[in-house]
Image: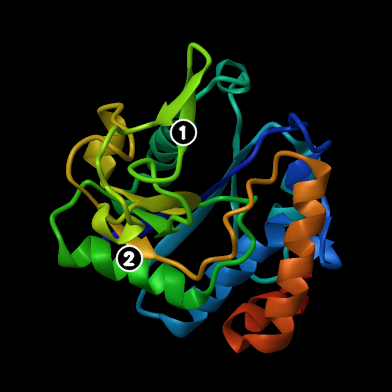
Amino acid sequence: MKILFTICGRAGSKGIHNKNIKTFCEFPLPLYSLSALDLYLTKHPECDADIALNTDSLDLKEILCTNTKRNVYYIPRKHTLTGDFVAKKDVIKDTLIEMENLTHTSYEMVVDLDITSPLRTVHDIENLIQKFRDTSCDVVFSAVPSRRSPYFNMVYNNNGSFERIIPTNFTARQEAPDVFDMNASLYAYRCEHLKAGYGALEGYNELILMYDTAVLDLDHENDFTLMQVIAHFLFQTNQEFNEVRCNILNLV
């Protein structure tokens, strides 16, 4: 059974102009996802897989589909899937259906790598796929331990009075349940679950923990700058992160 790896990104973006094709630490941002995937497939030659890009951006298509090493199928983004409020699971589902029709293949799972999460390692992809195969779950997603807890030190404005999001009598964070931030870097979906229209938090799900890089969402230019500062440090101090960056040279 084959794995379908998906990389999805639309033209333009809110907050950061052309976020999905920006240069990140000297290389186009989407090449970090392809590089990690290339390293995984090189390390696991037994893995039968296809890679698909779903986009309406010709610039993004040029960056990924003209790489010198991996065949990347191009799935044009349907106009109905380009809006600001389109759920990503619907884009991944469309990519799966189009790829099944194009390749006449039945896939074991769909693994999505988010373009705006460049700081992932081969080990992260291995953990995700192994977790999926070791369980009967519908979805595996990546996460990191949360730095804040809705049970203890997160509040909301209730008509001018700030209250805990989840009312409790906890006096120490250690009393509260462990909570996690979904970092949106990696998802593995069971194909039937995806086709039925279900999301990551529906059905039976599991998670894998990744290295905590402060979970910066790339929504503003300042986020992009801070993420590059973190990335440069990790590239200098962590071989697993650095090999992904260095391997980009083998793709261009």
Reply above or below: 74 against 86.
below
For residue 154, side relative to residue 166 (left or right): right
Q: Secondary structure at mark 2?
A: helix
**Residue 103 x/y as whole percent:** 42, 47
**Separation (CA) of disc 1 from disc 2:** 36 Å
For residue 84, side relative to residue 197 (left or right): right
Q: Quadrant of residue 33?
A: bottom right
**Residue 121 x/y as whole percent:** 53, 74
**Residue 87 x/y as whole percent:** 48, 27
Residue at 13% in and 55% down: 136
For residue 223, side relative to residue 85 (left or right): right
Residue 70 seen from this side: no
**Badge 1 density bin: few <14, some 14–19, many ≥20, Cα 10 Å:** some
Quarter of the image with the C terminus in it:
bottom right
Name the residue type under label 1.
Answer: Val
Q: How is the image coloured?
A: rainbow
1 vs 2, front mark: 1
Q: Which residue is mark 2?
A: 129
Residue at 34% in and 52% down: 179
Q: Which residue is mark 1?
A: 155
For residue 157, side relative to residue 116 (left or right): left
Reply above or below: 110 against 99.
below
Residue at 44% in and 42% down: 99
